[in-house]
Amino acid sequence: MLSITAAFVLAFAGPAAAERYVVVYKEHSFGVWAAKWDVKRAGGSLVASYPQIDVVVAESTAPDFAAEMDRNRAVQGVAPVGSVVATASGFGWDGGPPGLPNEPATDDDTFSPLQWWSKRIKAPDAHEITGGSPEVVVGVIDTGVDATHPDLEPNIDASRSVACVGGAPNQDPAAWNDDSGHGSNVAGVIASPANGIGIVGIAPNVKLAIIKASVRSGTVDIFLADAVICSLMWAADHGVDVANNSYSVDSAIMGGTTSFCRNDDSQRTIIQAVRRAVGYARRRDVSMVASAGNNGLDMSSPAFDGCSRLPSDLPGVLTVSSIGLNDMLAAGPPSNYGLGYVDLTAPGGDFLQGVPPSGLVLGPWPAAFQVPRLLCDPCGGPDAAYYRFFAGTSQAAAQVSGVAALVVSKFGKERRWWSGRMDPDRVSLILRQTADPLPCPAADPRCVTEGNRTSFYGKGLVNALHAVTRDKRDP
């Protein structure tokens, strides 16, 4: 039986053409059964209810559903988010034994010599102290993973893995299978085990909670707000310590935007809902890490006043830019940046720094998507293990999430069964204080310095060794 503090989820099979909505209630005016009745009366059906943050996800074919809900005095805002329908299943969570055991890890897997990015942040040095604790869990909110990949499968915690497509959780393993490749790559960068196959992740001993939040549309992965809210709430209520967010929230399947502005009622509602979910996750001791984005934009410029990229632009989220082989801000793809927007940087790779693939990031890749131009076909002896080079802030964020997991492993402690094991503010402080400062390039006027941070690199390059030894770089 679910406790009142757990997300209360009701799943209904909606019509195929139903529109999906996020409904934000005013604080302290929300009741689960009242919300269900509100939605039904407005011509909809309840998909999921999150009383912890006063938000529901609903579906309706009624053209005036949003207007009807908006007339409710308890409702603060209503926003359409798409028309993807998914069914839900119940929760599952295995709390595990108390204590945070730590063991070192080796970095001598097949492709360890190609992991320049891992060496750049001193992860192999940190691994001599700890490869992470198997009691620490990183939630990979992404496109799912190939759970059969031998460089992922040993560290996947299926009991905490889920698909949130459609706004409600579905624990059927088939539902969180990777249909893109992006999630498998990111998950491997975070926590591929030191098993003699392929690569070694930044935190090779920790566990992975796979949280699928994307819809594949052609060649693009779409992350709608309802799926992201569901994902954040799942991470919060299932003992996740670090949540990696290598994506941005999209406003629609086609023709949408990734910039949400407060002068638009629907977009303001999405900002409020996602912000509440992030805040709830942090209160449950989930450290939030997000990619800065690959558009080459200055997110602190006046052009973005009143607008937010989600979740990277929200309070309490560690936002990560990307550098290349020569420590310059990545230009291919071009990393976003901004004073007060970027907190840290990591080597996400760059096609324009070094001769590819030398300046790119290698990670696992689903066998189903293997193509001849990838690194190997297959690798790892009898295990059909495939890998692919990537570049972007997604890979940079994954490295910071891995280091955050090492920090929690080393300095966290057993806390309440339903929460993570370390205060996110403390994790963030350690990562920022132990980062290696990187100065602005003298010839690049886009980069601005303020105190001990820059608009390109924030507090600097994450340093895994300094983080697990708490060797402060920032006075």
Image (tube, rainbow, N blue to C red):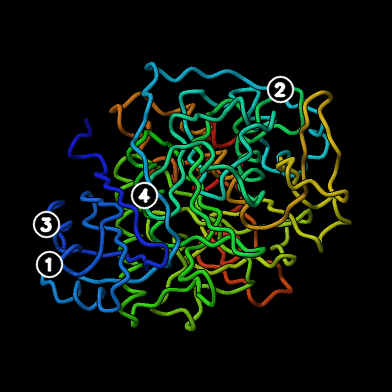
Q: Nearer the viewer, residue 180 or 156?
A: 180
Is residue 429 positioned above or below 249 on the image? Answer: above
Q: Which mark is residue 74?
A: 1
Q: Earlier in the sequence, mark 4 or mark 3?
A: 3
Q: Quadrant of the N terminus?
A: top left
Badge 3 density bin: few <14, some 14–19, many ≥20, Cα 10 Å? few
Label located before the other in sequence (4 or 1):
1
Q: Quadrant of residue 55?
A: bottom left
- The percent coordinates of residue 318 (x first, y second) are 47, 53
Viewed as shown, does residue 382 lie left or right of 401? right
- The front one of 182 and 58 is 58
The amino acid at mark 4 is Ala
Amino acid identity at mark 1: Ala
**Is the residue under label 1 in contact with that under label 2 (CB below 8 Å)?**
no
Q: Position of residue 290 (x, y in %)?
A: 51, 54
| Residue at screen point 54% across, 77% down | 255
Q: Few, some or many C-alpha atoms within 10 Å of disc 4 (few <14, some 14-19, many ≥20)?
A: many
| Dot 3 amino acid type | Ala
- Badge 1 crowding class, 10 Å Cα cut-off, few under 14, some 14 to 19, many 20 or more, is some
Residue 33 point in image, percent of width and height: 13, 52
> Taking 279 as reference, is 469 above or below it?
above
334 in relation to 90, above or below: below
In the foreground, 338 or 297: 297
Task: Read off the residue under disc 4.
Answer: 168
**Callout in the foreground (2, 4):** 4
N-terminal-most mark, 3 or 1: 3
Residue bearing the label numbered 3: 34
Q: Secondary structure at mark 4?
A: loop
**Dot 1 lies on which element?**
loop
How far apart are the alpha carbons under marks 2 and 1?
Answer: 54 Å
Are the two marked residues, 3 and 1, in contact with CB atoms closer than 8 angstroms? yes
Residue tagged by mark 2?
195
